Amino acid sequence: MSKLAPQYQFLDLSDYGRPLARLFANRLKNTRFTPIHVTLLFGISGLIAIYCILQNHYFTASFFIILKSIIDAVDGELARIKKTPSYTGRYLDSVFDLILNFLILMTICYVSETPFWLTFLAFIGIQLQGTLYNYYYVILRNKSVGGDVTSKIFEDKSPRALPGESQRSVDILFAIYTVVYGIFDKIIHTLDSDAYKVKTFPNWFMTLVSLYGLGFQLLLIAVLLSLNKIELIAPFFVAYSVLIFVLIGIRKVYIK
């Protein structure tokens, strides 16, 4: 089951792990594994990648970073297959992603002796890139009849818990999500406040925007690690952030 109705689907360059994710999810659908268990599993994969970076095993670290990206798609697939969507899983997934992004970059900073300020700018850039991708993607999902609408365009209040989850858990995770993502959401919404008024986004545009999806970001990190170019990761992502303004400019000029 896709997040988007068929007519809105596009080539998502950040979603290369989806076929394997669907395979794994189908294997787990009749087990006691829940989407939350899978979310915890991708967290473990990310921590293993961090350990490998600390040990200078960059190729192995790349493997676990890509594995984390694939597992990251399994929890959502499993929730859709089991028909157990939850805001708990949605917010936990996002919070874990941010924490792992920060830890991976700080580990790279330590090992490569990259200046902290440059690494921190790279982290901010990565979060803004991912927020732009998610902003446009969620707008498309909410306009797609038959698509997944667990994510909202504007996360301004805690949603009502879905069947099978605790309202308290949803409220706590929403509060954490708001703290860690709120500033990035506000920046992107300010830069392109009228995007939600667009009827739809062309497939070519969404494919271009998917260069900022977390999966593609992790793929770039994995490639640079495997090439033993760890010192280039932070400066690359700082420069890569310039594309934010290019994409927003394209949206404002050509997609109204």
Image (cartoon, helix red, strand yellow):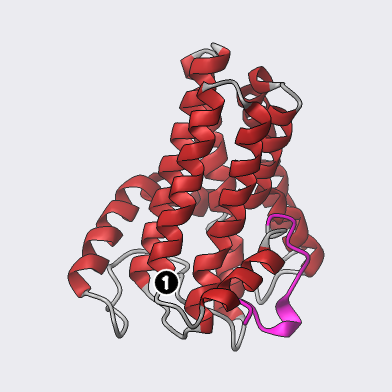
Residue drawn where x is 29% and y is 61% of the image: 174
Which one is nearer the viewer's eye here, 63 or 126?
A: 63
User: Which corner quadrant of the image does residue 129 belong to?
Assistant: top right
Which one is nearer the viewer's eye here, 32 or 113?
A: 32
Residue drawn where x is 29% and y is 82% of the image: 164
Q: Quadrant of the C terminus?
A: bottom right
| Residue 2 among magenta residues | yes
- The residue to which callout 1 is attached is 33
Which one is nearer the viewer's eye here, 205 or 190?
A: 205
Does residue 194 appear anywhere in the picture? no
Give the dominant element type of the magenta stretch: helix, strand or loop.
loop
Residue 67 coordinates in the image, percent (x, y): 61, 50
Residue 175 coordinates in the image, percent (x, y): 25, 56
Q: Is residue 208 above or below residue 256?
A: above
Residue type at tag 1 = Phe
Residue 106 coordinates in the image, percent (x, y): 46, 25
Look at the numbered disc 1 and give the secondary structure of its residue.
Answer: loop
